[in-house]
């Protein structure tokens, strides 16, 4: 009898836990405008410091749209953290005339043309705990992020058959732990909610943060739409030797959400 009671209790607990487990998946489009500067001094070139290139006026980056993905996995076991996985892409390209321009091994003393592009992929693994779970929800945790990026600059100097093309590829990648937090306010008697979510890291010569401010409307079966404002900031002279960046990417976003 005792064994049957224990077995029944375990089965009931399993069913209860299964009912309480859940998660969320979202996919969205992020329209971001760049600002700030970047420079690259290639060691031992003898060309001096790289130009502090404004990403809008010198590199001619303009607004762009990229996709992002997020997935949350939540469970009822108190001592184990919940999990969030995320992927964000950033890309920009530009073309225009420059003068007195140095980027690594590229030097344009008077007038020339450059073509360049930025590609950044950011992967996140977040472990977090729920502090509140009612009409006000609050989470706190730690994110291990990995950033993989490249800035490629191609210079074209001269005219016609005497023109010379030179390309400088600057790759950077690094792991970065950040503090994570999220707060959601579910407006009573409605299907609307307001949310803030963000990460922050600052140590030595690197500062990074990102945040989202959003509003969500949930339809039946947990399906919903979300729209808001998203911002990312990266300020570092320690990505690789010679590369210095102080860049912001800000703009609106929209996403489709399934809360299950």
Image (cartoon, grey):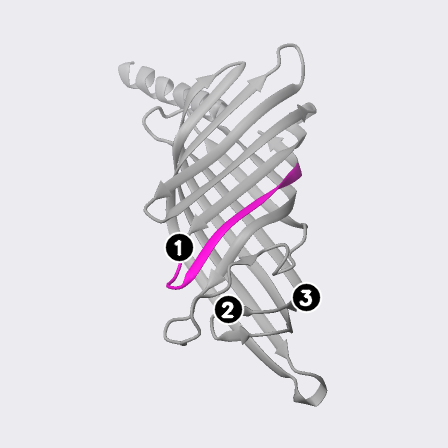
Residue at (70% x, 89% y) in the render: 161
Q: Secondary structure at mark 2?
A: strand
Where residue 207 appears, as percent x and y from the top left, is 41, 44
Where residue 12 appears, as percent x and y from the top left, is 41, 19
- Quarter of the image for residue 258 reads top right
Judged left or right of residue 175, residue 160 is: right
Q: Secondary structure at mark 3?
A: strand
Residue at (51% x, 29% y) in the render: 22
Residue 96, numbered label: 3
Q: Which residue in the structure is indicated by mark 1?
A: 237
The mark nearer the N terminus, 1 or 2, is 2
Q: Which residues are magenta?
A: 239-254
Where residue 239 appears, as percent x and y from the top left, is 40, 57
How far is the residue under mark 3 from the one under mark 2? 15 Å
Q: Foreground: 117 or 113?
A: 113
Q: Main secondary structure of the magenta part?
A: strand
Q: Residues within 10 Å of mark 3 (few under 14, many from 20)?
A: some
Residue 103, numbered label: 2
Residue at (38% x, 51% y) in the render: 175
Specify the farthest residue to the top: 189
Query: Vertical placement of 242 versus 186: above or below?
Result: below
Residue at (47% x, 54% y) in the render: 245
């Amino acid at each position: 009898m005792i064994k049957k009671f224990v077995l029944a209790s375990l089965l009931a607990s399993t069913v209860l836990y299964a009912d309480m487990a859940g998660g969320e998946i979202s996919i969205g489009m992020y329209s971001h405008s760049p600002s700030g500067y970047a420079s690259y001094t290639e060691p031992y070139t003898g060309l001096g410091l790289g130009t502090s290139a404004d990403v809008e006026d010198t590199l001619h980056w303009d607004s762009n749209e990229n996709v992002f993905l997020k997935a949350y996995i939540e469970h009822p076991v108190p001592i184990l953290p919940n999990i969030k996985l995320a992927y964000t892409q950033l890309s920009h390209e530009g073309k225009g005339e420059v003068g007195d321009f140095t980027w690594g091994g590229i030097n344009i003393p008077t007038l020339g043309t450059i073509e360049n592009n930025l590609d950044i992929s950011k992967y996140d693994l977040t472990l977090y705990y729920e502090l509140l779970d009612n009409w006000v929800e609050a989470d706190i945790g730690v994110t291990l992020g990995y950033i993989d990026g490249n800035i490629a600059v191609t210079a074209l100097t001269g005219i016609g058959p005497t023109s010379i093309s030179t390309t400088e590829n600057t790759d950077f990648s690094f792991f970065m732990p950040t503090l994570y937090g999220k707060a959601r306010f579910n407006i009573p008697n409605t299907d609307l909610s307001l949310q803030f979510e963000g990460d922050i890291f600052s140590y030595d010569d690197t500062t990074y943060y990102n945040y989202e401010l959003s509003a969500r409307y949930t339809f039946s079966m947990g399906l919903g739409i979300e729209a808001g404002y998203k911002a990312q900031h990266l300020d570092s002279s320690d990505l690789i030797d010679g590369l210095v960046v102080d860049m912001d990417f800000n703009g609106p976003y929209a996403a489709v959400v399934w809360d299950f």
